[in-house]
Every structure is written in C-alpha cells, then in structure tokens.
C-alpha cells in the first residue's frame, strides 16, 4: 500500500472515539516505512503534550463564570452601536432597505462587469460594438462568384 492511503487509514483510525488495536495492514506498513513511523511518533508526541496540558490547566478564579455570563448578557441585551438604528427604523423596514440596497448593488456590479467585458471584446471599447462595419474597420465579405451562386427552387 502507498503511504498516502495508509495515512488516510491512520487518520480514520485515530478519529474513532475509542479505537482498539491498530489494524494489521497499518501496523505492518508503519513497521516497514520510516516516514510513516516518524509520522506516528510525531503524532504521539503531540497527543501526549495535549493531554498533559489539559491536566495542567490552571483552575478558574472564583466567580469567573458568573462574571462572564453577566457581561455576555449585558452585550446581548443592548448593543449600543446599533441602538439608534433600532429606534429610528423598525426591523421589517430595515430588512427591506438592506435587501433593496443589496439588489441595487448587484445590478450596478453586473452593469460594470458587462461594460468591462464589452470593452474588452471591441478594439475601440464598448462604443465600437454598436457601430457599423465601416466604423469598426471590418472589410465587407467578397461577393459570391456567379458559377457558385445558389438559386432558390
């Protein structure tokens, strides 16, 4: 098996909440492949470090959770930055105004992109597209010779 497929299997095996023993094909490959063996060693070192950090985490000060909850509740109740908007514009009208402004912005953006595309297609810019063949310096097609002309039935 390739290292890429083995590493995918290793990740799948590690994602199991309580994995059993490592499957034999993965274990055999890790034993024979120095790169995958080094990968597993690095992964184990990271995991051991994370577990030790979790066990060494400092305890929260007394009252921390209640202070945090009260501060979060205060910000959820009255965000001062938008309170004047809520007093002036009811929520339904604010949503409609936002939707209308978004639609107008989208129309303007489509117009600008269309103009840029048209300008890039024409050697004289967007104005040259609407002009006649003479204005755009296009040679008219040569007439069809008489011996090839098609007559209607």
Image (cartoon, grey):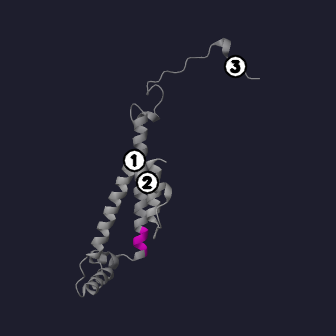
Q: Which residue is located at x 40 percent, y 37 percent?
A: 119
Q: Residue 26 location, x and y as percent?
A: 47, 55
Q: State the mark number for residue 103.
A: none
Q: Where is residue 13 in the image (x, y as percent from the top left)?
A: 46, 62
The mark nearer the N terminus, 3 or 2, is 2
Q: Which of marks 1 and 2 is nearer the N terminus?
A: 2
The residue located at (67%, 11%) in the rendering is 147
Tell me, yes or no, if residue 81 can be seen here: yes
Q: Is residue 140 left or right of residue 37?
A: right
Classed neighbour count for the residue bearing mark 1: other residues with Cα under 10 Å, few (<14), some (14–19), many (≥20): few
Kind of element beneath mark 2: helix
Q: How crowded is mark 2: few (under 14 residues within 10 Å), some or many (20 or more)?
A: some
CA separation in Å, label 1 and label 2: 48 Å
Considering every residue shown, the one lying at the far right of the view is: 153
Residue that carries the numbered disc 3 in the rendered image: 150
Q: Mark 2 points at which residue?
A: 7
> Label 3: how many residues lie within 10 Å, few (<14), some (14-19) or many (20+)?
few
* Residue beneath disc 1: 112
> Which residue occupies 43% across, 50% down?
110
Q: Earlier in the sequence, mark 1 or mark 3?
A: 1
| Extent of the magenta region | 92-96
- Look at discs 3 and 2 and give the one toward the viewer: 2
Nearer to me, 43 or 37? 37
How many numbered marks appear? Answer: 3
> Looking at this view, is 30 or 78 the one in front?
30
Q: Which of 132 and 67 is in front in this view?
A: 67
Question: Rounded to the nearest whole Å, what is the CA distance between mark 1 and mark 3?
Answer: 45 Å
């Amino acid at each position: 098996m390739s290292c890429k497929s083995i590493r995918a299997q290793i990740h799948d095996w590690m994602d199991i909440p309580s994995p059993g023993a490592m499957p034999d094909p993965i274990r055999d490959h890790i034993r024979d492949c120095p790169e995958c063996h080094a990968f597993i060693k690095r992964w184990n070192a990271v995991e051991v470090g994370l577990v030790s950090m979790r066990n060494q985490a400092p305890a929260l000060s007394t009252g921390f959770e209640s202070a945090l909850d009260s501060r979060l509740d205060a910000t959820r109740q009255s965000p001062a930055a938008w309170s004047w908007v809520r007093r002036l514009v009811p929520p339904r009208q604010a949503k409609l105004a936002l939707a209308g402004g978004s639609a107008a912005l989208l129309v303007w953006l489509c117009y600008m992109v269309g103009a840029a595309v048209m300008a890039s297609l024409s050697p004289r810019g967007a104005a040259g597209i609407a002009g006649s063949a003479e204005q755009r310096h296009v040679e008219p097609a040569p007439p069809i010779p008489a011996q090839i002309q098609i007559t209607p039935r």
